[in-house]
Image (cartoon, rainbow, N blue to C red):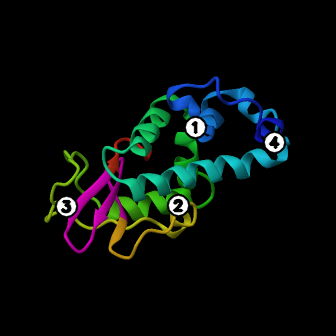
């Protein structure tokens, strides 16, 4: 039955085995869906991958897939960056930059969140497009990097370099 609904997916290997990866990298993956559904499915696949990255953590296949998509798919990057454009974009960028005077900061996973660095929270307009995190983890922004911080331990759980404009 799944072949009837989505076609034969056994021919795919590596990252292309993921329907979400194909959504952003293979135009043929969209042909079975009505064009009116494409914006919703784009947001759904991006949010689903962010959730997997959060749940599975550093070194997981989900993190690898997200890194591949950020490098390969302008549309995937655009989903995250879309919040920074439009009528509220300037306000969102200004809010982030007010709390973030340090631009160049070297981050590593499992390192201490920089103590002297102000805590820049993610604007609500962006939070609405991202999966909800467990209470002990928070989204942060450092420069152009999107960061997950364990707020109790003050540790960088994960980050995506250059994810934000």
Q: Are marks 3 and 4 in contact (CB under 8 Å)?
A: no
Q: Earlier in the sequence, mark 1 or mark 2?
A: 1
Which of the 4 quarters of the picture holds residue 152?
A: bottom left
For label 1, the SS is loop
Q: Which residue is mark 2?
A: 130
Q: Residue at x 80, y 32 (%)?
A: 31
Q: Position of residue 115 (x, y in %)?
A: 14, 65
Which of the 4 quarters of the picture holds residue 56?
A: bottom left
For label 3, the SS is loop
Q: Residue at x 42, y 65 (%)?
A: 122
Which of the 4 quarters of the picture holds residue 28?
A: top right
Using the image, determine if residue 1 lies above or below residue 16.
below
Nearer to us of marks 3 and 1 is: 1
Nearer to us of marks 1 and 4 is: 4
Q: Earlier in the sequence, mark 4 or mark 2?
A: 4
For label 4, the SS is loop
Q: Earlier in the sequence, mark 3 or mark 1?
A: 1
Report the disc number at residue 98: none
Q: Tag 1: Cα neighbours inside 10 Å, few (<14), some, or many (≥20)?
A: few
Q: Which residue is mark 4?
A: 1
Q: Earlier in the sequence, mark 3 or mark 4?
A: 4
Q: Which residue is mark 3?
A: 113
Give the alpha-carbon distance from disc 3 to disc 2, as whole Å: 21 Å
Q: Tag 3: Cα neighbours inside 10 Å, few (<14), some, or many (≥20)?
A: many
Give the alpha-carbon distance from disc 3 to disc 4, as whole Å: 48 Å
Give the alpha-carbon distance from disc 3 to disc 1, as whole Å: 32 Å
Q: Nearer the viewer, residue 139 or 1?
A: 1
Q: Which residue is mark 1?
A: 18
Q: Tag 4: Cα neighbours inside 10 Å, few (<14), some, or many (≥20)?
A: few
């Amino acid at each position: 039955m799944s072949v009837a609904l989505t076609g034969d997916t056994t021919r795919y290997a590596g990252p292309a085995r993921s329907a979400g990866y194909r959504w952003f990298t293979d135009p043929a993956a969209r042909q079975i869906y009505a064009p009116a559904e494409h914006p919703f499915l784009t947001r759904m696949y991006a949010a689903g991958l962010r959730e997997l990255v959060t749940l599975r953590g550093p070194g997981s296949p989900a993190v690898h897939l997200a890194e591949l998509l950020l490098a390969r798919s302008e549309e995937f990057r655009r989903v995250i960056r879309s919040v920074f454009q439009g009528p509220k974009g300037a306000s969102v960028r200004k809010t982030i930059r007010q709390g973030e005077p340090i631009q160049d900061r070297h981050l590593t996973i499992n390192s201490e969140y920089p103590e002297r660095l102000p805590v820049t929270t993610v604007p609500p307009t962006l939070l609405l497009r991202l999966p909800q995190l467990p209470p002990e983890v928070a989204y942060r922004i450092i420069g152009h990097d999107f960061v997950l911080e364990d707020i109790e331990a003050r540790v960088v759980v994960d980050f995506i370099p250059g994810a934000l404009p």
